[in-house]
Image (cartoon, rainbow, N blue to C red):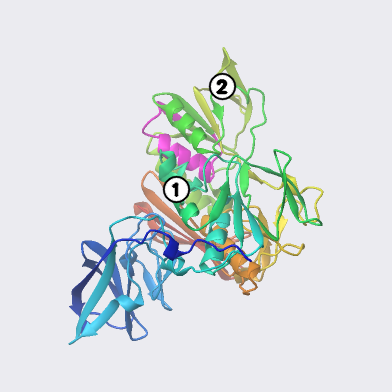
Amino acid sequence: MAERRTTVDDVEPHTEEVLTEEVCHESDLQEGQMMEVEVGQHKVLLVRSGGVYSAIGNSCTHYGAPLSKGALSGGRVRCPWHGACFNVKTGDIEEYPGLDCVTIENNKVYVSAKIKLRGVYVNCDAFLSLVVLRINNRAFILTGPAALVCAETLRQENYGGRIIMITKDDLPPYDRTKLSKARSKKEGILLRRMEFFHEYDIEVWMNKEVKFVNTDKKTVMLNDSSQHHYDQLLIATGSRARDLECPGADLENVTLLRVPEDARKIHHGSINCRAVIIGSSFIGMEVASYLADKAASVTVIGSSKFPYERILGPEVGMITMQILQEKKVKFYMKDCVTEIKGENGKVKEVILKSGVVLPADIVIAGIGVIPNSEFLFGSSVNLDSRNMVIVDKFMKTNVPDVFSAGDVTSFPLAAYENQRVSLGHWHLAQTQGRVAALNMLNKPAEMKSVPFYWTVLAGKSIRYAGYGEGYTQVILKGKVEELKFLAFYVKDDEVVAAAMVWA
């Protein structure tokens, strides 16, 4: 007989108080409008879409942006900060009401909300309806945000098999994007706490690394030489920072930004010290922005004429450089490091190809990434010339029951005539994780998202949507001198991407 899974009825019930409050008059909202209201001191987004009122939480689950300031279209509201979408009928917010929590009586709109008295780290109400039996199938899911969303989606869709997540970190999946933007404690960057995984029977094997995948025998071998059978496998191992290769790269206080410990090392090693940053793209520029008011001096070395030049173009790249120059960050562009010299094992100065010698107490390298796919060498899984895992629009590899998602993949970008790309974008990884999960369950789903990413430099927000590879023209619209403008990237007389700079 199949072993019975722990269900909601087996768990101590949540104590909840239901509040119902009048929030507005029926005529206060017209079709396609939304507004922020309060129920029991909780902010709620009230929406009128398709002739129906609904309510969801007003805070985006990513960084808490107010959804009332977002855009409503097609039954979805899009976060004004980072582009996340929420279904206005079901929502995806912890503790807040859905469609059946809104009633209209005598032309007055009432919203009912459940206020939890015992908190549980859960985002989706759908999890609370799980009543499933354990079956013998097991899904192995390898690390990262794509892996987390895949695991959550499997449970939301009532997958009853065993789910095992494997990570070489000593933490469950966490938000790596925060490492270069702010100083955060470990618990502050977790995407889910361990209580969540325990409650929904998702195993997390930490400090474990997959060394080889045998797709013929459907096994994974770990760094402890143990072998484990899988029925379905998701490869979401992401990418890692490229090592710095020059004399002196092994000196103390020469570091990359890979894990939380690196972020702490950079923070403590830079206070009132001379920081030199190698690389002028996202990691390098965000670290420079973070250290600008902490280090005694910050210097950025870049190989192009301007930061972000390949992606954002010289016009926007020059502006990003000026933003940090106003914070006294110095730039040495179209240059590179030939050697790092030290004294007593610690970094002392950085030598550039141009002959410039930069005094330094700490050196941070952000010079690109490489995919974590070495464990697939010699397997049947197809990799491209850069060792990215090749998948189709369903996130399937060439091997049955093996899927891949996130930064490690090369996938067809639907909005751009299925051009094959590899993009390290947070929201793309999560979307791919969900698409992979649905297809693992034989519920056909395709990857159709448009790339979106963002950064903040010295309080100035930069957001980018689309895929501008090979653009031939950049058109600026707005008040460039006030840092409030749009940049449109044109290729073959079509806008293929857009960036917004907003002070």
**Residue 35 image position (x, y, % from top left):** 27, 71
Query: Which of the image's four quarters has the N terminus?
Result: bottom right
The residue at 40%/28% (across/down) is: 295
Residue that badge 2 annotates: 252
- Count residues near mark 1 (Cα–Cα under 10 Å), then give few for <14, some for 14-19, many for 20+: some
Task: Identify the image quadrant of residue 233.
Answer: bottom right
Q: Which residue is mark 1?
A: 319
Rendered view: 478 above or below 21: above
**Residue 228 rendering spot, x and y as whole percentages:** 71, 50
Instruction: For residue 285, say whether it is visible.
Output: yes
Part of the protein shown in magenta: 278-298
Q: Is residue 177 above or below residue 148?
A: above
Can I make out residue 489 in this image? no
Distance (Cα) linking label 2 and label 1: 34 Å
Q: Residue at x 82, y 57 (%)?
A: 216
Tell whether position 439 is magenta: no
* Marker disc for residue 271: none
